[in-house]
Image (tube, helix red, strand yellow):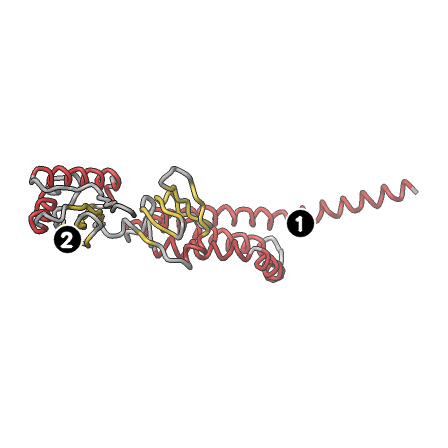
Amino acid sequence: MNYLAANLLLDSLRDLWDGFITRLPSIVTGLLVILLFYILAKGIRYISRRSLKRMKASEHAARITARLVFIAVMVVGVLVSLGVMGVNAGALVASLGLVSVGIGFALKDVIENFIAGLIIIFQRPFLVGDFICLGGVEGTVEDVRVRDTVIVMLDGRQVFVPNSRIFSSEVINNNRNRRRRLEFEVGIAYGEDISAAAAAAQDSLVGVPYILAEPPPLVVAEEFGDSAVILKVYFWIDPTRGYFFETRSEAIEAVKKGLQKAGIEIPFPIVTVKPGS
């Protein structure tokens, strides 16, 4: 009995070996086909990346596109190689198609983020280094990936925002326009000349680092406050150079000095207490 089982095992191994020897030329040819497609895919990836850079596409978009092109060429190469080896590539693709339907339902959110990521990368509503606002998230874009976007907030924390959320929400890009307006308020005493105070405040902003000369700073009367006339100070900066907080602080300091130099009083809040109240 053991002898019969051993013979059957040897016959099976012999058949497998004979089949392997018979298919060996096609297997070698299939492996060579994969190697050729690999070389071809690398060449096409390099050419596509160079071409996109010449078309002034972003580095990130060029890299992602080249990677997708490489994968597509390799998929074709594997299918051709399987056909050369004698594998029914059509039946294999059909089987994979049925499996991919189930996987698609299971990975719906991942696929949604992937597609949204590709759209964001190619439409470029923002680039790496831009300062954006998205809902409760405000910070600098550190990386735009296929699944999510990495944002570094002002306090240094990283936020990984799913691309599907970005694609379906309002995004404020503070760097897209090379001019961004900042503002603050300052109060002057009711007895002061509003026009003279506005002119003094406006002149004090000339020459402050990072404040743009065009459009020029603007100072207007905003409202009557409890103990002062409120002036609204507007000025513009280049957001790509940063220094939001520093520039605003220097502007406030310059306006304070300018008003003091012109003899314009900046009053303290006044509280009137009536007897018996």
Can you tell which mark lies on residue 5? Answer: none
| Three-letter code, disc 2 | Val
Secondary structure state at the residue bearing disc 2: strand
- The crowding category of the residue bearing disc 2, from other C-alpha atoms within 10 Å (few below 14, some 14 to 19, many at least 20), is some
Q: Is residue 231 visible?
A: no
Whether residue 82 is situated above or below residue 242 in the rendered picture: below
The structure residue drawn at horizontal position 60% and vertical position 50%, both measured from the top left corner, is 26
Kindly identify which residue carries mark 2: 220
Q: Which residue is mark 1?
A: 22
The residue nearer to you, when weighing 70 against 173, is 173
Nearest to the observer: residue 134 or residue 146:
134
Q: Which of pointers 1 and 2 lies earlier in the amino acid sequence? A: 1
Q: Provide residue 23's location: percent of width, then percent of height.
A: 64, 50
Q: Is residue 115 left or right of residue 62?
A: right
- Residue 249 visible to the viewer: yes
Residue appearing at x 76%, y 45% in the figure = 14
Name the image quarter holding the N terminus.
Answer: top right
* Residue drawn at 7 percent across, 40 percent down: 263
Q: Quadrant of residue 275?
A: top left
Picture coordinates of residue 240, whole percent (x, y): 25, 44
Name the secondary structure under disc 1: helix
Task: Give the label, 1 or 2, closer to the camera.
Answer: 2
Q: The residue under label 1 is which amino acid type?
A: Thr
Q: Position of residue 252 (x, y in %)?
A: 19, 40
- Residue 52 lies, in percent from the top left, at 32, 52
Query: Is residue 120 or residue 181 the one in the foreground?
Result: 181
